[in-house]
């Protein structure tokens, strides 16, 4: 069984991209924490190397066991463990940056939401692998939606909006891959769009008109149609009513929650500094270890959430572009593996793992270049952090697992 | 619409769509990088090398506080603050440079460079903002900083509103003061929208109404280079303008407050609370000794703070609401009311033993304050002359159970709920309390003899006593004392009617009430009464003196009163620590407050309005 690890079918570009990104990550964790005025530990890169060994071991192990083992009952067990850790975090978790995200046991601290994402993908893949079900039937969608919604809400409670949205992004990608028509996915997100637009009446009316047109053209069944129309009407009318009845402090909480940068002097400032750092790298960068913006210690998360701005500053457009291309390669290979797998569970597993990467890379890089709000999501493989690194290697391990056994039905 | 048949290759259409979407997303990232790094790169390189973008907080002025007639108690004036930006390029290139800057600034700011350094080390971890080194600096300092700009990288002079209390010591305890937020508060999510170095209300109205008074700070991004400010950082959001805090109009009457403050001898310790018995509005609230809240606005030294908070007579301590004293004989009208209401006595009740100056209970002798004795008395005279021996027997007649039940109705062991922070609650013990603290059966029934005359384990705050005096004045309503007449800019309405949630009504038989009131009136008007020193021309005053024994020196002097008796408009409690008898030390203070209320001197308030 272990010999499978050396099977020629292992996806080499994916492996290469993973290892290169990890090494680049360690180099820049070193760089980001190297300046004398740094407010963080200098030896963090050594810890990251130790985490890497742990992560590689975990990735190899999860790749070695044929992936079919994770289907069915095992998936529920893994998911159960993931949820238990999340619940535990809410009760006895450590508070970091205003939210309970960490679970500690002696010197070991883990971030259960990272592992919960992997477990959720496995269960979703297992549920959606059932060919006998018609995935356009609403009653059949209840299971997968609940599977993603429970961890999503638990993480939301911490509160960690960025990670909780990750569960929804994963769900939608996997539903799409499972065969749900694009239109259905569109209908599923209409209530969310509705909430956002309900305060802007012209936009809301336009959206309702558009929705009505699409509904009319799509000729979907009566029950789903009524459901879409009903939910949208209720949400659209109720949201401003509820909002108006909230206490000022409740409103304040919600807007802070949705946009952490709105009232914190830090976040808007971080984005500006991150843009200056990346922009000042110009084409070739200031050279490894020669960044100056990072030396200001302006970003408490320069070695975690904002590591990409250090890369951009020190290696310029060439380096930052290269790293972006490595991520693109990793994600495209993930999609390729998912596509090639003959087994439906395998394909869904691979696409789910790939979607985690896609969402994180997207949100993090967009944040550092000023295209997305500050959410506090790490950049997989590059950012400092054991839980994230181990989770990333578990994801890569599972994609490789599917790649190695693509012939199996 | 069936799901796509999934077989080998069945995902291909989806793969193509997804691949195109992913490539598109990454193309957008590369495009963005191209714009930032290649097209705008030189501009950002310049920003990173020479200039610095920083956030400038535009501090919102706090709301003004005025008395009930609109006279200013607290406002804000412009002032200069010297700040240092620890993230200035000069310091990231050469951290040692900070020391020379601080050495240069030390003498002009009158601060120890080491202290400044500690402050910077602590605060730079919390935010990216420039750190305030000293508030309210003079024009000489401003000039010094401007002249030596090249030697003081990252040092700026910023304009900030300064909290000012134009009347200084006047009303310090009810107003409170402002000070820099503590690290402990900063760590608390409840203070999530505060930044290190922000001012926050401490004590008094400043604390209690912090939310209303604070306002909302604004901010703007400015570009700063070696020569100073270059202007707003263009291309970013517009400056967010600060929103001034909400103004408050208090129920306090400044003339009365001044009369009450001036009634104390210099160096005296004590408190006065004056309440409108018709609605619970606090008209004056004094605690002595007091302090000057202006001292805190600019940042106070550690030594000065220790001096104020503990040294000497604890000036920061608000005796009006935080100190619990035995009420002494001021409790007698209420004990008597309890006995009347319980039917234990009538107005005509004489007790078996006439006052000989002492009373024997078991093996113990309980003395009357007047050693020569009062002779045989009925209730009226017992109150007027404050005869302890009469009340010992009254206490035994009613019993501790019924007495404490009635005091419970008057909520003696609860806070009044005044809208000031850190109010303490008083205590009137009941048998259960003694069981708990002394052990069941391990306490004597004789304790009621102490309780009935307001001694022993019972204790009340001055504000509670004022509430009780108001209760007697209005005939049975316990108003929650409150300090706010109006919030915001609307003019105070002449007849503000607080809602029913602010009062608790205790039903009292009018006949019994009349007995007590007429006795309290005689306390002041009768030649044999103990409260003669509170008499005021042409106003009928009802009062009761108290002298609370305490083991640490001279007794505390107390006095409660209300006036005019026919339709009371003011109820007062006075306490003077270690001053001796209520009749000689507390009643005269009440008289000065009453005079201030009924016969105000032609006001010098024109001077007050124009400030200091």
Image: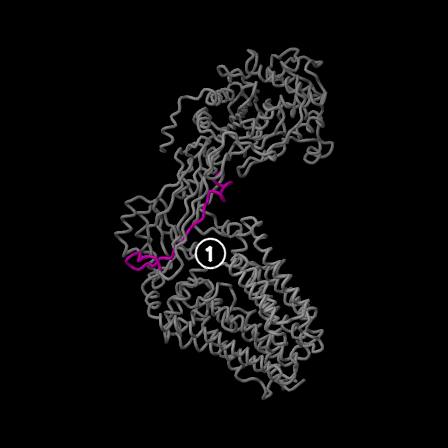
- Quarter of the N terminus of chain A within the rendering: bottom right
Judging depth in this view, the residue of A367 and A47 nearest the camera is: A367
Whether residue A108 is visible: no
Residue A321 rendering spot, x and y as whole percentages: 43, 76
The residue indicated by pointer 1 is A264
Q: Secondary structure at mark 1?
A: loop
Reply above or below: A75 against B373: below
Reply above or below: B598 against A308: above
Q: Chain of mark 1?
A: A
- Quarter of the C terminus of chain A within the rendering: bottom right
Judging depth in this view, the residue of A275 and B17 nearest the camera is: B17
Image quadrant assignment for residue B466: top right
Residue A138 rendering spot, x and y as whole percentages: 68, 69
Reply above or below: A206 against B272: below
Residue A17 rendering spot, x and y as whole percentages: 51, 80
Q: Residues within 10 Å of mark 1 (few under 14, many from 20)?
A: some
Image quadrant assignment for residue A357: bottom right
Q: Farthest residue in the bottom direction? A: A8
Whether residue B595 is visible: yes
At a point 35% along the width and 59% down the height, the residue shown is B233
Reply above or below: B170 against B36: above
Q: Is residue B227 magenta?
A: yes
Magenta stretch: give its range: B204-233
What is the total number of numbered labels drawn onto the structure image? 1
- Would you say B305 lies left or right of A343 here? left
Q: Is residue B248 magenta?
A: no
């Amino acid at each position: 069984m272990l010999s499978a690890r050396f099977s020629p079918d292992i996806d080499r570009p994916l492996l290469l991209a993973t290892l290169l990104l990890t090494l680049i990550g360690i180099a820049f964790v070193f760089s980001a924490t190297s300046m004398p005025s740094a407010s963080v530990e200098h030896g963090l890169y050594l810890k990251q190397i130790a985490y890497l060994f742990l992560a590689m071991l975990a990735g190899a192990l999860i790749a070695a066991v044929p992936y079919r083992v994770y289907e069915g009952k095992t998936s529920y067990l893994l998911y159960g463990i993931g949820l238990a850790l999340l619940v535990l975090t809410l009760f006895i978790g450590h508070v970091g940056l205003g939210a309970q995200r960490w679970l500690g046991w002696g010197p070991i601290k883990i971030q259960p939401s990272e592992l919960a994402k992997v477990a959720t993908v496995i269960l979703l893949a297992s549920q959606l692998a059932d060919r006998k079900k018609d995935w356009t039937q609403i009653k059949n969608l209840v299971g997968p939606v609940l599977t993603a919604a429970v961890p999503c809400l638990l993480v939301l409670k911490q509160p960690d909006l960025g990670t909780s949205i990750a569960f929804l992004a994963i769900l939608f990608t996997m539903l799409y891959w499972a065969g749900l028509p694009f239109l259905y996915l569109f209908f599923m997100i209409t209530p969310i769009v509705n909430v956002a637009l309900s305060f802007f009446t012209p936009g809301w009316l336009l959206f309702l008109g558009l929705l009505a047109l699409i509904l009319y053209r799509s000729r979907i069944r009566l029950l789903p149609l009524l459901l879409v129309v009903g939910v949208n009407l209720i949400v659209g009318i109720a949201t401003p009513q509820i909002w108006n009845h909230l206490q000022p402090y409740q409103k304040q909480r919600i807007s802070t929650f949705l946009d952490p940068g709105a009232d914190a002097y830090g976040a808007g400032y971080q984005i500006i500094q991150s843009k200056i750092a990346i922009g000042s790298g110009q084409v070739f960068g200031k050279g490894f270890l020669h960044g100056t913006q990072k030396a200001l210690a302006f970003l408490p998360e320069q070695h975690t959430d904002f590591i990409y701005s250090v890369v951009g500053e020190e290696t310029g457009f060439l380096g930052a572009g290269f790293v972006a291309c490595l991520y693109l390669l990793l994600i495209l290979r993930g999609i390729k593996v998912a596509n090639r797998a003959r087994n439906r569970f395998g394909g869904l597993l691979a696409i789910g793992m790939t979607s985690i990467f896609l969402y994180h890379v997207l949100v993090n890089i967009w944040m550092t270049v000023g295209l997305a709000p500050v959410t506090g999501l790490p950049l997989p493989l590059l950012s400092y952090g054991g839980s994230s690194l181990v989770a990333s290697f578990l994801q890569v391990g599972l994609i490789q697992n599917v790649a190695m056994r693509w012939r199996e039905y | 619409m069936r799901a796509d048949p999934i077989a080998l290759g069945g995902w291909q259409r989806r793969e193509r769509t997804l691949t195109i979407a992913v490539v598109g997303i990454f193309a957008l990232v590369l495009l963005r990088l191209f714009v930032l790094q290649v097209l705008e790169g030189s501009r950002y390189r310049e920003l990173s090398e020479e200039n610095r973008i920083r956030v400038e907080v535009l501090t919102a002025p706090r709301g003004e506080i005025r008395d009930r007639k609109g006279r200013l108690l607290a406002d804000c004036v412009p002032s200069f603050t010297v700040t240092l930006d620890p993230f200035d390029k000069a310091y990231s290139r050469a951290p040692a440079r900070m020391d020379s800057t601080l050495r240069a600034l030390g003498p002009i700011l009158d601060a120890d460079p080491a202290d400044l350094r500690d402050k910077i080390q602590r605060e730079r971890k919390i935010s990216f903002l420039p750190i305030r080194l000293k508030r309210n600096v003079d024009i000489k300092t401003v000039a010094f900083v401007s002249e030596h700009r090249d030697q003081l990288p990252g040092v700026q002079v910023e304009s900030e509103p300064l909290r000012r209390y134009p009347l200084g010591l006047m009303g310090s305890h009810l107003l409170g003061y402002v000070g820099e937020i503590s690290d402990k508060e900063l760590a608390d999510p409840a203070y999530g929208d505060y930044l290190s170095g922000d001012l926050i209300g401490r004590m008094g109205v400043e604390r209690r109404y912090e939310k209303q008074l604070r306002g909302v700070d604004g901010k703007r991004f400015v570009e700063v280079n070696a020569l100073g400010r270059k202007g707003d950082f263009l291309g970013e959001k517009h400056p967010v303008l600060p929103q001034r805090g909400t103004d408050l109009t208090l129920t306090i009457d400044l003339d009365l407050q001044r009369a009450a403050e001036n009634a104390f001898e210099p160096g005296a310790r004590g408190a006065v609370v004056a309440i409108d018995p018709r609605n619970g509005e606090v008209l004056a609230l004094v605690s002595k000794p007091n302090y000057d809240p202006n001292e805190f606005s600019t940042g106070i030294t550690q030594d000065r703070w220790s001096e104020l908070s503990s040294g000497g007579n604890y000036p920061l301590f608000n005796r009006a609401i935080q100190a619990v004293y035995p009420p002494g004989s001021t409790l007698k009208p209420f004990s008597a009311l309890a006995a009347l209401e319980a039917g234990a006595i009538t107005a005509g009740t004489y007790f078996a033993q006439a006052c000989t100056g002492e009373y024997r209970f078991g093996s113990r002798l309980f003395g009357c304050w007047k050693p020569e004795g009062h002779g045989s008395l009925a209730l009226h005279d017992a109150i007027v002359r404050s005869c302890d021996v009469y009340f010992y027997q009254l206490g035994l007649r009613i019993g501790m159970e019924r007495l404490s039940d009635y005091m419970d109705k008057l909520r003696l062991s609860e806070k009044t709920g005044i809208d000031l922070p850190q109010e303490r609650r008083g205590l009137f013990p009941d048998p259960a309390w003694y069981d708990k603290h002394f052990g069941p059966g391990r306490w004597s029934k004789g304790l009621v003899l102490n309780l009935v005359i307001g001694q022993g384990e019972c204790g009340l705050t001055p504000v509670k006593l004022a509430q009780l005096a108001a209760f007697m004045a209005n005939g049975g309503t316990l108003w929650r004392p409150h300090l706010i007449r109006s919030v915001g800019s609307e003019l105070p309405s002449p007849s503000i009617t607080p809602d029913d949630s602010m009062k608790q009504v205790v039903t009292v038989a009018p006949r019994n009430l009349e007995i007590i009131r007429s006795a309290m009136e005689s306390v002041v008007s009768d030649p044999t009464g103990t409260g003669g020193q509170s008499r005021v021309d042409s106003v009928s005053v009802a009062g009761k003196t108290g002298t609370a024994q305490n083991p640490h020196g001279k007794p505390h002097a107390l006095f409660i009163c209300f006036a005019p008796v026919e339709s009371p408009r003011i109820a007062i409690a006075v306490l003077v620590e270690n001053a001796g008898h209520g009749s000689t030390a507390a009643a005269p203070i009440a008289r000065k407050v009453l005079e201030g209320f009924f016969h105000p001197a032609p006001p010098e308030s024109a001077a007050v309005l124009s400030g200091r």
